[in-house]
Image (tube, helix red, strand yellow):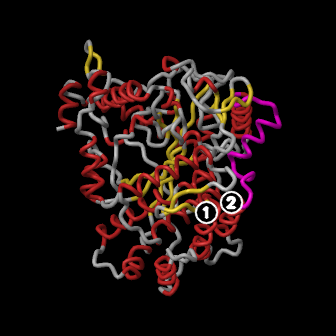
């Protein structure tokens, strides 16, 4: 980066793609979503009912499952080339779910409803099989380590893989000695590093948790302000979900995972799942015949590591995530930093998805040097500052060890994305990617346009508490899906068939178990 903010490496790479004269070379990357929502009663309390059987088995249904809690539904889409197809599928999935919720609602925000401590949050149940028991023991461990309340937070994960035609052009542009999977894995790790550098922009643009119900803290000390009784907030926050009060808590401060290469990533991850942790040893593993956690290591399993973005590979049956990556390399990335949007019935919108696609491409095309430990400290601080104070006037972040204004840096990144969006818009007269980019650019010029500012403005003008606002939006979303016409009956029938089939699959898994859980666990970790 020069003093003028011109990134010569990026400009050269982008020109290489333009000059390759390969129409649509950036188009058609595969996109998928995972969207979490708490099931709540009509009064806005976390549901204590079982996961509805009409939605199938949470263990084996690939599109409707549960996350930490029995009440935390997770909707998973398959990958699509077009974002409108993805959103249509997610909309149909919501319609199906709402037809089987009875009088319950899906909570419309990332931060949860009124909670009455850990005991009010039921751990997800998956049946009698060994794999089900493992999932439940893992969740018991999360509850003991971090508290169940933190696990009641919801989010949206954006999965993305580059289009096939992208790779040979990129190999040529970089004049790479690597080819095939080795090349693509290396470039996915470039994305991971640059997302750590620039991902604070996603928090600023899309963060939507500046306030929450005071019951979330359960009497813990804090430095937040009270908007009105029962509602705590930070005036300039974008995403308290992604702050030190949410997922970025001190419990994982000792977990440092390098993204400088696939080898280093796997080395650090394997170390974390094999190193005993004194605090977790005090909890105990199997006490009075009951598992409190899977083990007393720094991480019980790889998925316990919380990060803004992950490298992923679809695993084979019985294969751990790290084994899948070691076997075949990176297949796609999972962006995990998105809050559920209360202003969108499905929790996301098309402008957001188009921006994220272009942003991941930006992270791929920009130079991506290894991250030193000192740079990582600054990058973590940038994310934490933007989560807590992102809309503060004149806010400064750290770039290459020097202070830089959030607004000027953000506009620089937006400007770099313009050429990418033009290539994504090729052949589309309405230029949807440029339009999506301009919507985000406006938020940097005017912070009041951000979702976090809109949420606070709504609370202040309506006089609602956070709870009242979220319950009102949850009811509005339920009405939207139940009244949506005409429904896609063919797809709803597909969801019914998948739910029925998943119940049979769970029964088959339970019938096939021939060893006890202790032995199953020993074999899994062997």
Residue in view at x 64 percent, y 28 percent: 213
* Nearer to me, 475 or 501: 475
| Residue wearing tag 2 | 444
Tell whether 209 sits left or right of 153: right
497 relative to 30, above or below: above
* Residue 384 image offset from top left, x and y in percent: 53, 46
Mark number displayed over residue 87:
none
Asked if the stretch drawn in magenta spans residue 497, the answer is no
409 relative to 278, above or below: below
Name the secondary structure under disc 2. Answer: helix
| Marker count (numbered) | 2
CB atoms of marks 2 and 1 within 8 Å: yes
Please report the bounds of the magenta region as a residue range: 445-467
* Residue 346 in sight in this render: no
Residue 229 falls in image quadrant: top right
| Residue wearing tag 1 | 410
Tell whether 401 sits left or right of 291: right
Residue in view at x 62 percent, y 23 percent: 114
* Residue 105 image offset from top left, x and y in percent: 64, 29
127 relative to 362, above or below: above
């Amino acid at each position: 980066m020069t003093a003028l903010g011109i990134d010569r490496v990026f400009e050269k790479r982008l020109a290489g793609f333009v000059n390759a004269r390969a129409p649509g070379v950036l188009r058609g990357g595969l996109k998928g979503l995972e969207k979490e929502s708490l099931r709540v009663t009509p009064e806005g309390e976390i549901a204590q009912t079982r996961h509805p059987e009409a939605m199938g088995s949470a263990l084996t249904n690939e599109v409707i499952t549960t996350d930490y809690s029995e009440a935390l539904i997770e909707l998973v889409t398959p990958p699509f080339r077009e974002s409108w197809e993805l959103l249509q599928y997610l909309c149909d999935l919501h319609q199906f779910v709402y037809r089987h919720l009875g009088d319950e609602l899906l909570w419309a925000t990332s931060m949860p409803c009124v909670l009455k401590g850990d005991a009010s949050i039921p751990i997800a149940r998956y049946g009698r099989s060994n794999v089900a028991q493992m999932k439940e023991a893992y969740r018991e461990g999360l509850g003991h380590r971090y508290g169940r309340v933190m696990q009641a937070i919801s989010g949206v994960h954006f999965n993305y893989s580059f289009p096939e035609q992208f790779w040979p052009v990129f190999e040529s542009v970089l004049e790479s000695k690597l080819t095939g999977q080795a090349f693509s894995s290396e470039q996915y790790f470039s994305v991971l590093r640059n997302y750590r550098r620039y991902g604070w922009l996603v928090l600023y643009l899309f963060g939507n948790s500046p306030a929450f119900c005071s019951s979330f803290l359960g009497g813990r000390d804090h430095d937040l302000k009270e908007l009105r009784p029962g509602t705590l907030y930070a005036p300039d926050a974008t995403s308290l979900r992604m702050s030190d009060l949410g997922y970025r808590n001190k419990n994982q401060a000792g977990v440092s995972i390098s993204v400088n290469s696939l080898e280093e990533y796997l080395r650090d991850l394997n170390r974390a799942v094999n190193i005993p942790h004194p605090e977790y040893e005090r909890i105990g593993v199997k006490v009075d015949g009951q598992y409190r956690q899977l083990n007393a290591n720094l991480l019980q399993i790889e998925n316990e590591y919380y990060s803004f973005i992950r490298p992923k590979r679809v695993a084979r049956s019985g294969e751990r995530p790290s084994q899948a990556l070691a076997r075949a390399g990176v297949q796609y990335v999972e962006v995990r930093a998105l809050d559920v949007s209360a202003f969108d019935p499905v929790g996301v919108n098309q402008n957001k998805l188009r921006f994220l696609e272009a942003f991941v491409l930006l992270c791929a095309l920009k130079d991506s040097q290894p991250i030193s430990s000192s740079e990582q400290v600054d990058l973590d601080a940038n994310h934490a500052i933007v989560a807590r104070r992102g809309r503060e006037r004149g806010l400064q972040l750290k770039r290459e060890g020097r202070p830089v204004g959030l607004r000027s840096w953000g506009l620089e990144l937006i400007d770099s994305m313009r050429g990418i969006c033009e290539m994504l818009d090729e052949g589309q007269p309405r230029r949807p990617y440029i339009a999506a980019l301009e919507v985000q650019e406006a938020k940097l010029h005017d912070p009041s346009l951000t979702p976090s500012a809109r949420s606070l403005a709504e609370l202040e003008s309506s006089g609602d508490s956070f709870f009242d606002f979220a319950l009102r939006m949850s009811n509005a979303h339920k009405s939207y899906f139940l009244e949506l016409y005409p429904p896609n009956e063919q797809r709803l029938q597909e969801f019914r068939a998948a739910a029925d089939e998943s119940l049979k699959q769970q029964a088959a898994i339970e019938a096939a178990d021939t060893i006890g859980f202790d032995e199953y666990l020993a074999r899994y970790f062997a």
